[in-house]
Amino acid sequence: MDGRSATIVALEGVRKSFGAVRALAGVDLEVRAGECLGLVGHNGAGKSTLMQVLAGTLAADEGRLVVAGDDITASAGVAAARSHGVVCVFQELSLCPNLTVAENARVMHRAFRGFGWRKRAGAAMVAMLDDIFPGHGIDPADVVADLSIARRQMVEIARAFLVTDQPLRLVILDEPTSSLDQIVAEQLMGFVRRFVARGGSVILISHLLGEILSTCDRVVVMKDGRVVETRPARDFTRESLVAAMGSVVAHEEGRSVAATARQAGETVVEARPPRQADGRSLSARRGEIVGLAGLAGHGQTDLLVRINAAAQGREPHARVAGAVAFVAGDRQSDGVFPLWSIAENITIRSLGRLRRFGLIDPAAEARMAEEWRQRIAIRTPDMGNGILSLSGGNQQKALFARALASEADIVLMDDPMRGVDVGTKQEVYGMVRAEAARGRTFLWYTTEFDELLHCDRVYVFRAGVIVAELAADEITEERVLQSSFAEEAA
Ligand SMILES: Nc1ncnc2c1ncn2[C@@H]1O[C@H](COP(=O)(O)OP(=O)(O)OP(=O)(O)O)[C@@H](O)[C@H]1O
């Protein structure tokens, strides 16, 4: 970046409160042409709220918004942002599930109209998908509801980068890789670099600090609704970035603790992917942390869902000894109960214990919710607030609390740490290890390699079947990747 690049966006003194919660306490932010700006901060720091103000989906209480030289404060809204070339891909995907990929492109790009629009929209989407995610395997006639969450995220991203009848200056990517595996995430980061090299601008929000440091030119750190640091990315290290976010850099004990603290009891889970023909199966013992790895969408979630169904007697191909709790990764479709309070979302699995004279004891429910608010720092002034009032990462923490607060012996985790900030992640890893040491069993699907280091054993999946089983001392990134791709893995 040279210092002379034009300013594309300037936000000045932006404030926004939701009732008693001050989400933005006077934020200034500048984005230049041809740069990728990283935006980091703890869960609830205000990142998404700031991006919503910029993209016009939320009105600020105060502040100025200048885009491409025009002060659009008075006319701020989605239409003004779009016509000035600002597009946002939010954490919660916004595709219409009952429409096809091509039809979803049409929803955002009115230019696809008249005779043959479907074909043109489909061709444009495929070209963009090919450019960003070579080998994506998505057809423009696919109905979005039938796509995996990773593919839906790819479609949403490709649609945002399509240029039709409006200029495209700035694309905001709010945790864009949260459902993507490492290979696809790297494809996206490569595309972002090409896009900014051509003069476009990107704001990248991510809790994966490696991704931020390797892709961004500058990094802005937010904390409690304010910008606390802005520096070129090269001036940050991972440690200094974590420190700027206000978290203590935890020393990774990871594997050594995981490997030694096991009590390797009796087998409590036994399950086989339906297409597995070589006799292999997944098993887990009491007190074990078992990882499910491999590229996204290769059968890991499916097997977890089957194990969950087995606990309810609905799946003959898996055997489960004990009560099971499921922590969803796709919180939008099978995680949160959107109309319920935060407290209710946490305690729903534990109602048996909260009963008094046959009725739920509200005081006990409030105590349990409060305990978990403190244990994993759910940022809210009131656990009676609606769950959707929480930031994305804080909603994810509530799902964790629901599973850990329950008395389940076996906890199934479907890549649930996406979107959780680094500080909290360390806390949760510690909790998982402590609970495993007390005899709970964890089956943990993750797309983040580092998380596999907390596991005692890892099964690698490919094309719906288990292709490798790695013992703790064999879990290396290289081995996992090798097995994920090899036709015949060991
Ligand atoms: N619709 C809403 N109603 C009430 N409070 C809200 C609403 N949206 C956001 N907040 C609050 O505003 C604060 C900032 O939230 P925001 O989503 O901007 O955080 P974030 O930095 O994007 O977090 P994350 O990393 O978890 O996505 C949080 O305390 C959140 O609870």
Image (cartoon, rainbow, N blue to C red):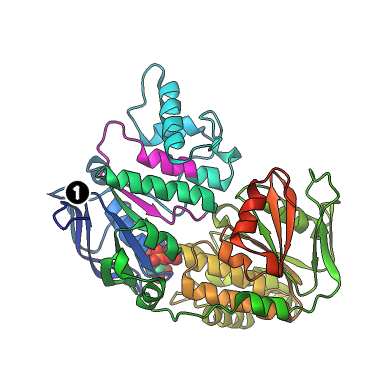
Q: Is residue 465 visible?
A: yes
Residue at the disc numbered 1: 75
Residue 301 inside the magenta-drawn segment = no
Q: Quadrant of residue 161?
A: top left
**Residue 73 location (% of width, % of height):** 18, 54
**Residue 332 location (% of width, % of height):** 54, 54
- The residue most toward the top is 115
Q: Give the amino acid at mark 1.
A: Ser
Specify whether 62 is left or right of 44. Answer: left
Q: Quadrant of ligand 1?
A: bottom left
Q: Quadrant of residue 308?
A: bottom right
Q: Is residue 360 visible?
A: no
Range of residues picked out in magenta? 154-178
- For this rendering, which residue is in front, 314 or 272? 272
Name the quarter where the N terminus is drawn.
Answer: bottom left
Identify the residue at image location x=21%, y=50%.
33
Q: Label 1: how many residues lie within 10 Å, few (<14), some (14-19) or many (20+)?
A: few
Residue 155 inside the magenta-drawn segment = yes
Total numbered circles: 1
For label 1, the SS is: loop
**Residue 285 location (% of width, % of height):** 81, 70
- For this rendering, which residue is in front, 261 or 229? 261
Identify the residue at image location x=26%, y=35%.
166
